DNA sequence: TTGAAAGCGCTACCAG
DNA sequence: CTGGTAGCGCTTTCAA
């Protein structure tokens, strides 16, 4: 099996304490000795044993704070939260505690307050959050990072912060995927309406951009007629969709770039356009599954929500326990096209 | 944090050794005392600490044997092997060793020999394999299980064995997904050819069955003209496809139910049918990505190969270390439709 | 049938 | 600057 500190100590002719101090750069060790110890460790491929470390960490547990929109409001975050709980379970034996705070949607003030709370009151050692893309959030993240509190963003990223990495979809790519899919779905020809979420959310903006890019590059006969913000709200998307498709009967397709799917589909059904107007949307909730089964929606594009909850905590645990940082600052989850048979 | 054996011992007024024996049913403990200890543990929600156990296991490491087709032959299994290595990495600090043996394709004799080898020579404590669906394999698996060596199958399952569970696609469902996708792709109308792999592989057979089922249920105007076995061989699939599409020019679609994708596509290109004949295939290799990009293939359906390597080992480690068995005997990986933009 | 003690790998602490 | 020791939770062994 692997080499241990004890073995290295024997070979180097010093005590385990000295090896520990040397390898972890804790200071108080002769630089000659330190060099020798490190050389031996290197040669033998020393890797600290996780179980051994865990037992020690347990005496002084570390806390990871998580901030995300409340699962009560969008089904989507229920799955994210499941991932958080799975990670919590997996790492609690390693002396890692997880504290979850929910915000109402992507409310900025709320998020700022919770970051402060986790930092000042809970004394967290690391943080994972579905970030509002705002400079104030970015500044707080950078501040935490400087206090030696690593931060990972998930689901939606923030610009210009010192976060360790982002876990979630490449939303431009997701939008492009939708565009290409729409091209195939309507035979490269037709008039399309787009109902999006909130433009202040980077992810929603990118999903629209990617979609438009593909149409421009490859599908000259496809025409995007309308783009609207529905703020992830079913009533707004219902009202807008109903009005739009009632007025313009030449529309053949609908691209739903975020939540509010149920409202839009309800409108189509009431107009008897179900199945006639081709619909592509995102994510995978019980409501959406039903709409796939009755052929109101042709495809939905998913993004591994459970992983989005799980992975940031795994990454942070790896940093806290093993001082191991991820390779890339982008940890993209898969873009998963689903149809009525693959859900 | 969690309760420990030590705390339970104090409360019960006995030694840690006694608590250990009681909770793990090792015998040699007064039944009254045992009952009392178990009651306390239950009430306090005792869960053994993984790190603590790991350190002990390490003294007498456990071995998990893995058998799968060599990655040299199909690119697909390179990714599976990556998953195996990831799991190996993750669990080696817990005293778990992983021994991998490669077979040539799905050769029965080869697989039987390797099972024996892992059992007799390597004295494995658990096994994970991409099973050949044969009664002899099933019998060996059942034998191992009776020797207290749990077995998990992945990628393709075996009938009537005592394996703990299967990790991989629901291939009927994957076939149905392909059928529905084809329906959308060719507008519910057209003549289709199918080139499959080996009918003795359960997964390949099911992919064809699911496909045919959906067409029969929902697409009366789609017609399957030919079904062939290409034995995962590019030359055979090339020859067959070329001959077929040269002869019958009314064919509009091709369903490739397993490997041999490159050969078939090469044939289409030579016949100048690239992009005209709609192609759906499985899995995600560099070759397939290229064919998606140049629009020879419309969709490919993937099955989480990395997870297929990783998950069985995680499940087996959980059994060996924590005596925890999976909920279901089917641990299905996701069915992931990809187009040229989402790869 | 039970308890006491050692030891897995690691870190923290104290004494020198 | 260094060594020794204790202790995290668990299992194992030996002695009683």
Image (cartoon, coloured by chain):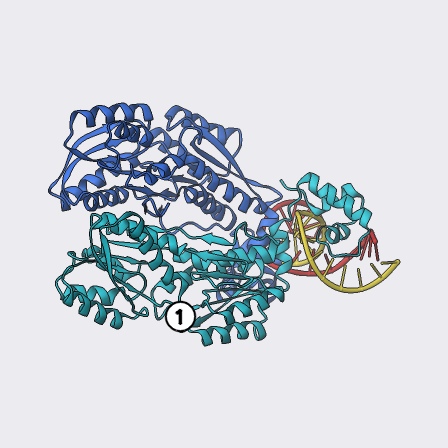
Chain colours: A blue, B cyan, C red, D yellow
Q: Chain of mark 1?
A: B
Which quadrant holds the N terminus of chain A?
bottom right
Q: Residue at x 22, y 35 (%)?
A: A277
- The residue closer to the viewer here, A164 or A273, is A273
Residue A296's image quarter?
top left
Q: Which residue is mark 1?
A: B70
- The residue closer to the viewer here, B290 or B51, is B290
Residue B330 in view here:
yes
Residue B304 in view here:
no
Q: Residue at x 32, y 70 (%)?
A: B231
Task: Tell me the element at label 1.
Answer: loop
Which quadrant holds the C terminus of chain A?
top left
Q: Residues within 10 Å of mark 1 (few under 14, many from 20)?
A: some
Q: Is residue A191 above or below residue A235?
A: below
Q: Percent x, y for residue A227?
A: 20, 30
Q: Percent x, y for residue A272?
A: 24, 30
Q: Is residue B244 above or below residue B51?
A: below
Q: Is residue A169 left or right of residue B311?
A: left
Q: Residue at x 32, y 55 (%)?
A: B211
Q: Percent x, y for residue B316?
A: 55, 58
Q: Is residue B190 above or below residue A103?
A: below
Q: Is residue A280 left or right of residue B88?
A: left
Q: Residue at x 57, y 54 (%)?
A: B318
Residue A302's image quarter?
top left
Count of numbered tags: 1
Q: Percent x, y for residue A194?
A: 22, 33
Q: Is residue A52 left or right of residue A162?
A: right
């Amino acid at each position: 099996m692997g080499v241990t500190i004890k073995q290295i100590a024997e070979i180097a002719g010093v005590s385990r304490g000295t090896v520990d101090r040397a390898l972890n750069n804790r200071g108080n060790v002769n630089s000659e000795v330190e060099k020798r110890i490190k050389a031996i460790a290197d040669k033998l491929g020393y890797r600290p044993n996780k179980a051994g470390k865990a037992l020690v960490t347990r005496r002084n547990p570390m806390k990871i704070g998580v901030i995300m929109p409340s699962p009560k409001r969008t089904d989507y975050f229920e799955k994210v939260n499941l991932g958080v709980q799975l990670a919590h379970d997996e790492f609690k034996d390693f002396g890692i505690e997880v504290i979850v705070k929910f915000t109402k949607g992507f409310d900025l003030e709320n998020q700022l307050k919770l970051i402060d709370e986790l930092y000042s009151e809970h004394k967290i050692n690391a943080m994972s959050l579905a970030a509002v893309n705002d400079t104030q959030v970015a500044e707080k993240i950078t501040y935490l990072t400087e206090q030696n509190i690593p931060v990972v963003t998930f689901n939606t990223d923030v610009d210009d912060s010192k976060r360790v990495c982002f876990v979630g979809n490449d939303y431009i790519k997701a939008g492009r995927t939708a565009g290409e899919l729409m091209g195939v779905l309507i035979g490269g020809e037709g008039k399309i309406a787009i109902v999006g979420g909130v433009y202040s959310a980077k992810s929603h903006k990118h999903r629209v951009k990617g979609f438009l890019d593909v149409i421009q590059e490859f599908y000259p006969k496809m025409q995007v007629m309308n783009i609207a913000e529905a703020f992830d709200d079913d009533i707004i998307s219902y009202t807008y969709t109903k009005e739009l498709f009632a007025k313009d009967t030449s529309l053949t397709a609908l691209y739903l770039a975020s939540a509010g799917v149920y409202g839009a589909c309800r409108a189509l059904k009431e107009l008897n356009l179900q199945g006639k107007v081709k619909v592509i949307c995102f994510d995978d909730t019980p409501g959406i599954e039903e709409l796939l089964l009755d052929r109101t929606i042709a495809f939905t594009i998913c993004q591994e929500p459970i992983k989005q909850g799980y992975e940031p905590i795994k990454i942070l645990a790896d940093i806290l326990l093993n001082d191991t940082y991820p390779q890339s600052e982008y940890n993209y989850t898969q873009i998963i096209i689903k149809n009525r048979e693959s859900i």
